[in-house]
Amino acid sequence: MTATTSATLASLLTELLERSEHLQDALIEEQRCIAGRDLAALGAAVQRKMALLDDVQTLDAQRRAMVLAQGLPDTNSGMNELLSRSSDDAVQELWATLLRSLQQGQAMNEACGAIIRRSLEDNHRLLEVLRGEPMESDQAAYGPGGTQQPRSGRDLGSA
């Protein structure tokens, strides 16, 4: 790999790492909005996250094009081969740091998804209770004195 190609790859990986770090910031903001049920701010946080994801995808497409331009396959092994051709250890470290950052971002995004799924499930169960729909067999309602009793299926408005 030429010095120019190595420098271009280092610049591209640095830019990808910056976007990945900004993406993690956006995910932290998204989690804060979800936890606080701040829907107005959540919309802005999600838009920021999506814009950063688009940036990451665009930059990664450029990285993949560099791998292909070197006559290597667009795979992990192709990228590893490209990195092994560089005499600049910093490029290899940038790649390793970028991969860790992207993995952290993926875990954070999955955590946001889990929080949202849990909230939707809780809201669904609450609506079922308010509608007087039968609860699942392993669920019970609390009666007078706080003792668990099987759900009667009555509407909340009836006596």
Image (cartoon, rainbow, N blue to C red):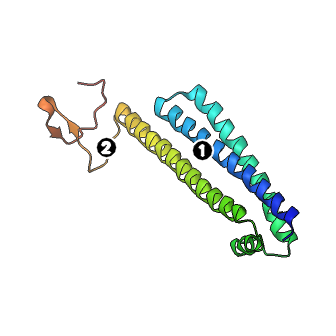
Residue 145 at x, y = what percent? Answer: 12, 30
Residue at figure coordinates x 26%, y 50% from the top left: 138
Observer-nearest of 123 and 70: 70
Residue 7 at x, y = what percent? Answer: 82, 59
Q: In which quarter of the image is the C terminus?
A: top left
State which tag comes first along the sequence, 1 or 2: 1
Circle 1: is it few (<14), some (14-19), or many (20+) Cα within 10 Å?
many
Q: Is mark 1 on a helix, strand or loop?
A: helix
Circle 2: is it few (<14), some (14-19), or many (20+) Cα within 10 Å?
some
Residue 14 at x, y = what percent? Answer: 73, 52
Tell me which corner region of the image, top left, top right, bottom left or bottom right, holds residue 24: top right
Report the amino acid beneath label 2: Met
Give me the C-alpha separation between circle 1 and circle 2: 39 Å
Observer-nearest of 101 and 93: 93
Q: What element carries label 2?
A: loop
Q: Quadrant of the N terminus?
A: bottom right
Q: Residue 24, which numbered label?
A: 1
Q: Residue 109, which numbered label?
A: none
Tell me which corner region of the image, top left, top right, bottom left or bottom right, holds residue 25: top right
Image: 93 above or below 130: below
Q: What residue is disc 2 on?
A: 135
Please name which of the two marks, 1 or 2, marks the residue nearer to the observer.
1
Report the amino acid beneath label 1: Gln
